Image: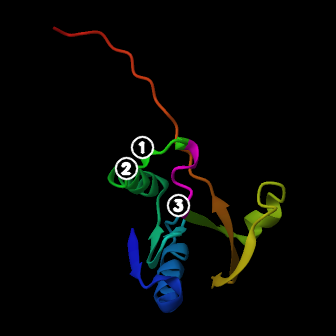
Amino acid sequence: MEKYTYGFKENWRDFLDLAERELSADYWWGDLYFMYHEDDGEDAYVFTKTDEIDDWLEKMFWDGCHYESSDLETSMDEFKIWKLIRESDVKKFTSLYKDAKRTRLVVDGETYYRTPVSICVEQTILISTSSY
């Protein structure tokens, strides 16, 4: 995870450098996500792995007391997340990425698009027996 204080506008070049470095790596099989909090214009974040963003969101859920919300499903909607997608994938999977927006990011001659990522907050029921 990379944190950008003062958001992406102030740190656009740094974000592009990170994206170009990560996306052009020969071993790259992951994804690149960028995120900001609707009520906090100060910080923006970049994640390179889905488990990394899931762990961070889970921590924000508990630290931010989102469990007290009357509607758990929308309790994390103030976090806005986008995934970067290669143009070749957007063209290949048109129905999947029909809402993808073109970005100015070009790595190794490939233009990247962004697509919104939804956050799913789900309740869990655990059933166990007493061990004493």
Q: In this view, does 71 lie to the left or right of 129?
A: right
- Residue kind at label 2, given as amino acid type: Cys
Picture coordinates of residue 58, whole percent (x, y): 40, 49
Are circles 1 and 2 on residues that touch, CB within 8 Å? yes
- Residue kind at label 1, given as amino acid type: Glu
12 relative to 112, above or below: below
Residue 85, located in which quarter of the rendered image? Answer: bottom right
- Residue kind at label 3, given as amino acid type: Gly
Q: Which of marks 3 and 1 is in front?
A: 1
Residue 75 on the magenta span: yes
**Outermost residue to the left:** 132
* Residue at 51% in and 41% down: 70
Q: In this view, does 7 lie to the left or right of 110?
A: left
The residue stretch that appears in magenta: 73-79
**The one of 97 and 119 positioned closer to us in this rendering:** 119
Are circles 3 and 2 on residues that touch, CB within 8 Å? no
Q: Distance between the residues labelled 3 and 2?
A: 30 Å
Quick one: label 3 or label 1, which is nearer the N terminus? 3
Residue 60 on the magenta span: no
Picture coordinates of residue 55, whole percent (x, y): 39, 52
**The one of 112 and 78 positioned closer to us in this rendering:** 78
What secondary structure is found at the residue carrying circle 3?
loop
Which label is found at residue 65?
2
Residue for badge 1? 68
* Residue at 65% in and 84% down: 106
Q: How crowded is mark 3: few (under 14 residues within 10 Å), some or many (20 or more)?
A: few
Residue for badge 3? 30
* Residue at 39% in and 73% down: 2
**The one of 60 and 55 positioned closer to us in this rendering:** 60
45 relative to 92, above or below: below
* Residue at 46% in and 29% down: 124
